[in-house]
Image: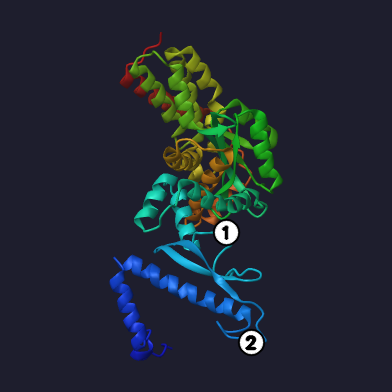
Amino acid sequence: MEGKAMPQEESVLRLGRDEALEAARLWQECGDAREFACRVLGSVMNAPMDSEAQQMCGASRNERSGGRENSRNGYRPRSLKTAVGDVELEIPKLRHGTYYPERMLARWSRVDTSVAAIVQEMYVCGVSTRKVERVASRLGISSLSSSEVSSLCSDLDAEVAEFRRRDLSGTPCCYLWLDATYMSCRVGSSVVSQGVVTAIGLGADGRKHFLGCDVVDTESEDSWAAFLGGLRERGLAGVRLVVSDSHAGLVAAVSRLFQGCAWQRCVTHLQRNLQSACSGRPEDSKAAVRDLVHAAVYQDDPDLARCVWAEAAPWVASVSARAGEVFEQAEDSALAFTAFPRAHWAKLRTNNVQERANREIKRRYRVVQSFPSRESMLRLTCASLMETEGQWSQQRVFSEASAAEGFAEPADRPAPTEGRRRALGRRAREIVDEIVERRGLKKE
């Protein structure tokens, strides 16, 4: 049922003649609408404070009464930064004891909660503290220094702590993406590079979830083991596949903490490793190596993928012995994703899920350039991750039914018959020969 329309004469604030004249006079005194709004807001906030202080006295102003318990002693001026600008307040003082409008103002805070929320949002979105100060000045908020902005943003610490400690037992994840990104941070009297390690999981609901974040000095096995052990202690379970680069400390920690779990070597990082091993070789030769890896990992048939890999190995070694060694050792880890549901392969071949998250972190870092402490680095990183996770909560990577397939034990594939092996071998040679011919590759 539709609500009854309010009569026009009751839908607006009605002012008496004196109030209307006072409002008109105030408008003429003010330079613009913002100043007028600040003056009006100040009057509205001062009135209840004055009334509360008078009630505490037990008698009206200048009234002689036996019930008087206290008396007024002037005002204490205070400036409050609000969304409309600086509002000048007059907090009543008493002869005995103190009065403070706790319900209206947070003690020791000179910034309205709405302004604090705006500042925090700008900070999380990557706006530097100095730029926040300039924006505040344009809004009519004076002297909101960069140190005050940092202080307001420190209120995020409680949310960050809760985010990092939250229970994961209700969020089983079949896939886990791990990575680290490095940023400059002041430690003691020096500015050094510090690593921010993060973990992203795919939950049973088919959505991505940030599971953890920490700051480490280096990506050692011990530091990764401590981070991953923390995830396990908080209840992380169900992991069937970990996707990451081939950093030795990370791989060792994964094998120790997630025994029985498969490890997928990020194909993008593998390509970079191979290109580095081919340094100094002709561009066509390096392009041939890149194409051979791509041809193997993007086959729809897992058996054909391994045949292409085996057929390509001697050609990669012909370009660079070091690249050939890396390529041969990477076969099982680069093709680990083929044991999982085909619909998931695109998300499992690479660590792009983490790379995109790192880009968002680095975008905000470019504004800061260097963090004053590890705590501030963790604060901004986690705030960025929480914002991203809020966006992820509105979209699924896979349906719940599809995600459930990721938790199932990979089925053993029957070995191909002799006839199928010969057919796969012929097809693999055709694929590799086409690339070799197109790139003009020749065995040395």
Quadrant for the N terminus in the image: bottom left
Q: Does dot 2 land on a helix, a strand or a loop? A: loop
Q: Residue at x 54, y 26 (%)?
A: 331
Q: Which residue type carries mark 2?
A: Ser
Q: Does dot 1 land on a helix, a strand or a loop? A: loop
Asked which colour scheme the image uses, the reply is: rainbow
Tally of numbered discs:
2
Cα separation between marks 1 and 2: 35 Å
Is 434 in front, or is 65? 65
Q: Which residue type carries mark 1?
A: Trp
In percent of width and height, residue 157 lies at: 59, 50
Residue 358, relative to residue 37: is it above or below? above
Is 111 in front, or is 99? 99
Q: Is residue 255 left or right of residue 305?
A: right
- Mark 1 burial class by Cα count in 10 Å: few <14, some 14-19, many 20+: few
> Do labels 1 and 2 touch, CB within 8 Å?
no
In the picture of the structure, the residue carrying the numbered disc 1 is 108
Q: Residue at x 30, y 70 (%)?
A: 29
User: Residue 134 got which mark?
Assistant: none
Instruction: Give the mark nearest the N terminus, 1 or 2.
Output: 2
Residue 176 appears in view: yes
In percent of width and height, residue 92 lies at: 55, 71
Quarter of the image holding residue 96? bottom right
Quadrant for the C terminus in the image: top left
Residue situated furthest top in the rendering: 444
In the picture of the structure, the residue carrying the numbered disc 2 is 65
